[in-house]
């Protein structure tokens, strides 16, 4: 008698169990996916920054008193924008307009000339770093589900100063006079 | 059973997503480290033991990090002795050929032009160990990640040099000899003094023993040998003295300071018949070997030397041989003992603006065979073959930014001399020295 009564109520339990199980499974899987997706995006950024830094190190060094310099005694704006375009679009001219990751702006790319010395300010190495854009915002890798997911808060990674890659400068000096 | 299978696949999925994801990032980062470090090292190699030391240090200080850009790699691996370090470390070694025997400290550094950088780092695994998956030996929670890069000074002698050559030449009649028969540290004419056929016994074709007297001023000391003098006097005469390029003052300045080379030049090219790109040349080939404009050029050469920032270490000779550089001095030497000071006693390494690249030419050499390194004929007045690429060092005097040597020391008839460094190596801007041996031009490049 008792057993029969229990059996009768089980259909509801299965539904709740399945719902609970699914809840956990979805959370675990979306979390796993998010982590993987975040790492994948970071890897793409790291590759882009590396390519940009390698490109910058081989680009002709552009400096002269009459050029448009980024700031006094620094690189030309043309040099900077070529490197930024190379990182973000994989194309120094900026003809391609699809960034390596959605939302990545050229202003996120910080190009630093290290140990600039002498009259022509030739650097010893060039560092390319992911930094704040023109509005002071850092690039954030957000997962596919993001914070909007009910089960999983989502992985997000704000990139302040990384990835960062340095190459020894080995380009020619083509400063004007 | 179902639980076990479920857990296994769940951890598998997490392992692939998280552990393998991280491994790929670390692998990419260490590869970037190796690439940059190998390039930095290869740029320093110059055939001496100082070059090897500088190369190792440059590689270890390249500054790139790994593990999501958080861990530095500055330790050199130690394979023997009590303090062995085999993980999270860097191995830097060198070889004469890409596939040759690599040594971290070759006893004789001559000819070592390849640098290999290897890293080995340990990455912690969090999920894969649960699956008992092991990629390498050792504890299951650690995965070793290796990366390797080789950079070398790649011979460019047979390819076109499109950028970077100064509009001068150096004269050699020994294409196949090491260093073109030049002496490292010796003085050679970039721009010859005016040849004067009206001087005694100086008609073109004469092969007398004192051909140097046929010039309005004595040529630089390294060129005072009969073969060189004969080639210049017989083939160039009075119309040519080693300058090639444009004649307007602004163009000369642009070419000397900016090395905006006018035409690509390749080994074996006839520099007297290169196609020119200016408006005053209507049909190629045009003669680009001209007399130049010496009054202006002296100041521009000084400006070029002034751009150099090599600071000599305290206590070094500073060119005088007295060890009298009391503090950090500018490398303002005008003696001949400059090359070792310039390349080895400076810190940090400067931009190398005093060094420059010129084609080494053989006046009179026609139909140069680049393989056998011989001329089809010599004594031809319409042909000056390019037989190699030389790196030279300008004189300087004064302070950084204000060198006045060429303006101070040269009259209108005098030659422009420069100090031979070696066959040209790689780009300027790194203060890089020359590789040892050979007669080529080199470019530092990743090869693996």
Image (cartoon, grey):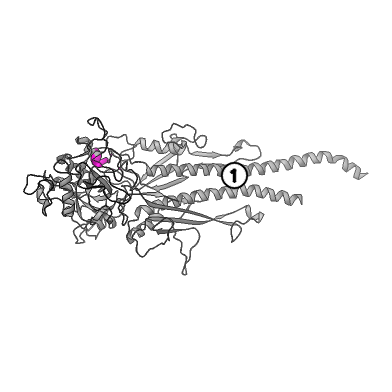
Q: Is residue A145 magenta?
A: no
Q: In which image quadrant can residue A61 be found?
A: top left
Which residue extends farthest bottom? Answer: B82
Magenta region, mostly helix, strand or loop?
loop
Asked if residue B323 is positioned above or below residue A62 in the image, the reply reads below
Q: Residues within 10 Å of mark 1 (few under 14, many from 20)?
A: many
Q: In which image quadrant can residue A151 be found?
A: top right
Asked if residue B89 is positioned above or below residue B28 in the image, the reply reads below
Q: Nearer the viewer, residue B37 or B47?
A: B47
Q: In which image quadrant can residue B315 be found?
A: bottom left
Q: Is residue A149 visible?
A: yes
Q: Nearer the viewer, residue B145 or B413?
A: B413
Residue assigned mark 1: A36
Q: Nearer the viewer, residue B270 or B125?
A: B270
Q: Is residue B357 visible?
A: no
Q: Which residues are magenta?
A: B254-272
- Percent position (x, y) of residue B214? 10, 48
Which residue extends farthest front? Answer: B377
Q: Nearer the viewer, residue B352 or B248?
A: B248
Report the number of numbered marks. 1
Taking the spot 79% from the left edge, 39% from the top edge, the residue there is A15
Asked if residue B78 is positioned above or below residue A72 in the image, the reply reads below
Residue B223 shown left or right of residue A119 in the figure: left
Asked if residue B129 is positioned above or below residue A106 in the image, the reply reads below
- Percent position (x, y) of residue B182? 23, 55
- The secondary element bearing badge 1 is classed as helix
Q: Is residue B263 magenta?
A: yes
Which residue extends farthest right? Answer: A1
Which residue extends farthest left? Answer: B200
Please state the chain letter of the residue tagged with numbered disc 1 in the rendered image.
A
- Percent position (x, y) of residue B191? 18, 45
- Percent position (x, y) of residue B230? 16, 50
């Amino acid at each position: 008698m008792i057993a029969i009564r229990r059996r009768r109520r089980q259909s509801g339990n299965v539904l709740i169990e399945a719902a609970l199980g699914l809840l956990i499974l979805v959370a675990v899987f979306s979390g796993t996916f998010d982590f993987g997706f975040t790492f994948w995006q970071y890897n793409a950024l790291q590759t882009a920054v590396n390519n940009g830094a390698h490109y910058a190190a081989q680009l002709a060094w552009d400096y002269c008193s009459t050029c448009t310099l980024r700031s006094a005694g620094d690189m030309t704006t043309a040099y900077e924008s070529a490197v930024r375009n190379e990182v973000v679009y994989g194309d120094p001219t900026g003809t391609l307009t699809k960034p390596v990751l959605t939302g990545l702006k050229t202003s996120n790319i910080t190009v630093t000339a290290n140990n600039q010395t002498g009259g022509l300010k030739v650097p010893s190495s060039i560092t390319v770093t992911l930094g704040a854009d023109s509005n002071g915002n850092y690039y954030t890798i957000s997962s596919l589900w993001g914070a909007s997911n009910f089960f999983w808060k989502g992985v997000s990674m704000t990139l302040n100063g990384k990835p960062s890659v340095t190459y020894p400068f080995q380009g020619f000096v083509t400063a004007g006079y | 059973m179902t639980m076990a299978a479920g857990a296994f696949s769940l951890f598998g999925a997490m392992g692939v997503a998280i552990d393998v994801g991280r491994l790929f990032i670390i692998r990419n980062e260490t590869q970037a480290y190796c690439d940059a470090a190998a390039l930095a090292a290869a740029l320093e190699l110059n055939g001496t033991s100082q070059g090897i030391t500088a190369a190792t240090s440059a590689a270890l200080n390249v500054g790139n990090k790994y593990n999501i850009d958080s861990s530095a790699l500055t330790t050199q691996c130690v394979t023997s002795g009590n303090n062995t370090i085999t993980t999270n470390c860097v191995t830097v070694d060198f070889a004469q050929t890409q596939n040759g025997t690599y040594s971290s400290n070759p006893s004789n550094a001559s000819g070592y032009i390849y640098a290999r950088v290897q890293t080995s780092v340990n990455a912690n695994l969090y999920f894969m160990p649960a699956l008992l998956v092991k990629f390498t030996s050792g504890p299951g929670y650690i995965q070793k990640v290796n990366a390797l890069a080789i950079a070398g000074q790649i011979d460019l002698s047979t390819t076109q040099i499109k950028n970077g050559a100064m509009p001068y030449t150096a004269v050699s009649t020994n294409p196949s000899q090491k260093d073109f028969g030049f002496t490292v540290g010796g003085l050679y004419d970039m721009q010859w003094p005016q040849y004067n056929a009206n001087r005694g016994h100086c008609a073109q074709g004469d092969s007398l023993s004192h051909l140097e007297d046929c010039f309005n001023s004595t040529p630089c000391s390294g060129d005072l040998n009969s073969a060189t003098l004969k080639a210049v006097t017989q083939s160039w005469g009075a119309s040519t003295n080693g300058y090639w390029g444009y004649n307007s003052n602004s163009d000369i300045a642009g070419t000397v300071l900016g090395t905006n080379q006018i035409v690509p030049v390749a080994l074996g090219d006839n520099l007297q018949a290169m196609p020119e790109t200016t408006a005053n040349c209507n049909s190629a080939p045009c003669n680009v070997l001209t007399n130049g404009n010496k009054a202006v050029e002296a100041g521009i050469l000084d400006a070029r030397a002034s751009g150099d920032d090599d600071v000599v270490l305290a206590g070094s000779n500073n060119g005088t041989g007295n060890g009298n550089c009391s503090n950090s001095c500018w490398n303002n030497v005008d003696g001949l003992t400059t090359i070792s000071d310039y390349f080895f006693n400076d810190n940090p390494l400067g931009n190398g603006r005093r060094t420059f690249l010129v084609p080494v030419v053989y006046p009179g050499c026609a139909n140069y065979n680049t393989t056998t390194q011989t001329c089809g004929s010599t004594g031809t007045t319409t042909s000056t073959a390019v037989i190699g690429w030389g790196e030279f060092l300008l004189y300087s005097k004064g302070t950084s930014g204000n060198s006045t040597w060429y303006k101070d020391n040269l009259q209108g008839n005098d030659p422009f001399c420069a100090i031979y460094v070696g066959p040209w190596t790689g780009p300027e801007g790194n203060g890089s020295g020359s590789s040892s041996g050979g007669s080529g031009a080199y470019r530092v490049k990743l090869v693996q």
